[in-house]
Amino acid sequence: MEYEKVYNKKILNDANKILKPFISNKGNAIVFDSRVMHKTILNKSQKTRVSLDFRILPLKFEKIAKMYRGTGYKRQRFTRGKYYNKKSI
C-alpha cells in the first residue's frame, strides 16, 4: 500500500509537469478515451460546467471486463447491473 501511495504521487508530480489545461470554446465538446490521464480544475466562474460520461463495452469483451473494477469511489465491477446497464442496447 505504501508503494502505491509513493507511485501515485510520482505519477501526479510527473503529470503536472507536462499536462496543460484544455479550455474548450463555447459549443464545443471534448471526446477522449477514459485511459487518457485527465482531471478537472475548480470552476471559479459563475457558469455551469457540464460533463457527460458514456461507458460502452462491446459484448465480446464482457467476460474479460468482469475481472476489473472501476477506480471511482464505489470501485464497481465492470458487470451488467453494476457499472453497465443490465440490458444490452
Image: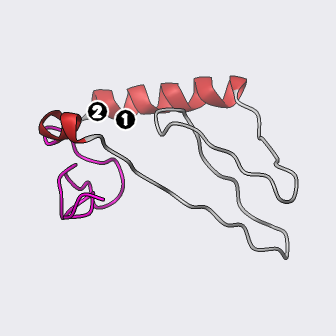
42 or 68: nearer the viewer: 68
Q: Position of residue 25 (x, y in %)?
A: 87, 52
Q: Which quadrant of the figure contains the C terminus?
A: bottom left
Q: Position of residue 20 (x, y in %)?
A: 76, 33
Left or right: 54 as drawn, with respect to 5: right
Left or right: 76 as drawn, with respect to 25: left
Task: Examine the rendered structure and indicate whether residue 81 appears above or below residue 63.
Answer: below
- For label 1, the SS is helix
Q: Which quadrant of the figure contains the N terminus?
A: top left
Q: CA distance from mark 2 to mark 1?
A: 5 Å
Magenta span includes 79: yes
Left or right: 26 as drawn, with respect to 55: right
How packed mark 2 is, by other alpha carbons closer than 10 Å (few <14, some 14-19, many 20 or more), is few
Residue depicted at 28% across the width and 61% down the height: 74
Residue at the spot of label 2: 2
10 or 37: nearer the viewer: 37
Region of the chain picked out in magenta, as a range: 66-89
Residue 5, numbered label = 1
Residue depicted at 60% across the width and 23% down the height: 14
79 or 20: nearer the viewer: 79
Instruction: Report if the CB atoms under discs 2 and 1 are less than 8 Å apart.
Output: yes
